[in-house]
Amino acid sequence: MKVLDVTEFYSERGGGVRSHMALKSHVLCQLGHEHVVVAPGPRDEEDEATGTPLGASVSRASEDAAGRARVIRIGGPASPYDPTYHLLVRFDKVAAIVERERPDVLEVHSPYLAALGAMRANRAHYGVRTFQWHSDFIDTYAGVLSAHLTDTFPRLGASTWSRGVVSATSPLWGLVRSIADRCDATLVAAAWQEAKLRSKGVPRVVRVPFGLERDVFRRDAQNDDTRRELLAHSPRRSLDADEALVFVGVGRFAVEKRWDIVIDAFSSLRKRHPAREMRLVLFGDGPERARMLARARGCDDIAMPGFVHGREALARILASADVLLHGCPFETFGLSLAEAMSCGLPLVVPDEGGASEMHDPASGERYHALDVEACVRATERLIERLSTDRESLRAAAAAAVGRLPTVVQQFEGQLALYRELLNRRRDL
């Protein structure tokens, strides 16, 4: 089977969608299929690579399979918000690539330019077309805009701005439905997203949960040297590796991720417990990095060392920390949270979005979304639990994500869905 994915969210330095595409290429290659990613870049180019072996994760029946993976970049201007992303504006080139490749599955990975490009493809040039819902973009940006307007014009009240923004963005659901109407299925990863899209009238919604790289994200990835390195991320004196608490956060520094909540909550926590040794290390990069550095100024126990290179390195960090703090209530699934839990890391998360669905009461705490004081109280509760039952919390976190598939199981399920859709199309 040949699967061709069209996306515009393909950063030069990484990111969630790019990581998803890389894993998909690896697995589909190992299972004997062909995977083509079409994405914007600084210039037109094409790279070919073989799938990276995933060891025992791949079924024995597929060990001798040899697939093919390629990335086709279409040159476009840099995004004005984040120059590491580029704009997919050559829709004619997308259509020409689909005509040349003749994929069995043409999958759309955004409701923006990628969708416009994929919709230009001739129906005779592919088998079925699917729509992968990565970002709850309407409510995400409506929520961010509403919060910004409330802060700027507080006398009008949050409810006034919320109603206005929701009213202004409601036609966008018509756009989503129009894209889904022209696709054979819309894929989502979380149960709450499946329910939401169905409630908005989006047709043919199918849930395919994201999978975990269990051989990478595991509790025994913990490393004493990594823990000492986490504690060293500060101009303050070195902290005791056994006594100090290490908080981490992982993700892109973008406005919707709400790192301001995490930074403000930790700063407040630090002031309330001055005698307690603790450190917050936020891993990632993005257009909001400078603003977040400015926001954290004055709290020496907050560090932002940048992007983590390598999944194994990230797993060591997660397994060697004590708590993951998360501020974004707009996650569609929360894969980074699942990876942290798989490493045995307890979480403090908001009570909305994919983060809330990922929450496990036996190993973490939840707080009212976007409420700094609530985040502080939730973190204090978790600190108290860690002081008495740390190992049980870590074991519970890892056990809670046992319900999720492996990455291979995820894509095997997706391939089965593709086959079903292709069979339906042939029967028409």
Image (cartoon, rainbow, N blue to C red):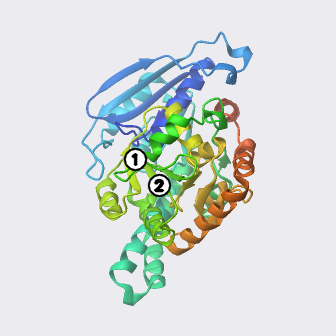
- Mark 1–mark 2 Cα distance, whole angstroms, equals 8 Å
Does the rendering let one see residue 109?
A: yes
Q: Nearer the viewer, residue 194 or 131?
A: 194
Specify whether 289 is left or right of 216: left
The residue at which mark 2 appears reads as 279
Mark number displayed over residue 233: 1
The amino acid sitting under disc 1 is His
Quadrant location of residue 359?
A: bottom right
Quadrant (top left, top right, bottom left, bottom right) of the N terminus: top right
Specify whether 69 is left or right of 9: right
Quadrant (top left, top right, bottom left, bottom right) of the C terminus: top right
Evaluate if marks 1 and 2 touch, with contact meaning CB atoms under 8 Å apart.
Answer: yes
Q: Position of residue 32 (x, y in %)?
A: 61, 17
Q: Position of residue 140 (x, y in %)?
A: 47, 62
Residues packed near mark 1 inside 10 Å, few (<14), some (14 to 19) or many (20 plus): some
- Residue at screen point 47% across, 66% down: 270
Q: Nearer the viewer, residue 84 or 234?
A: 234
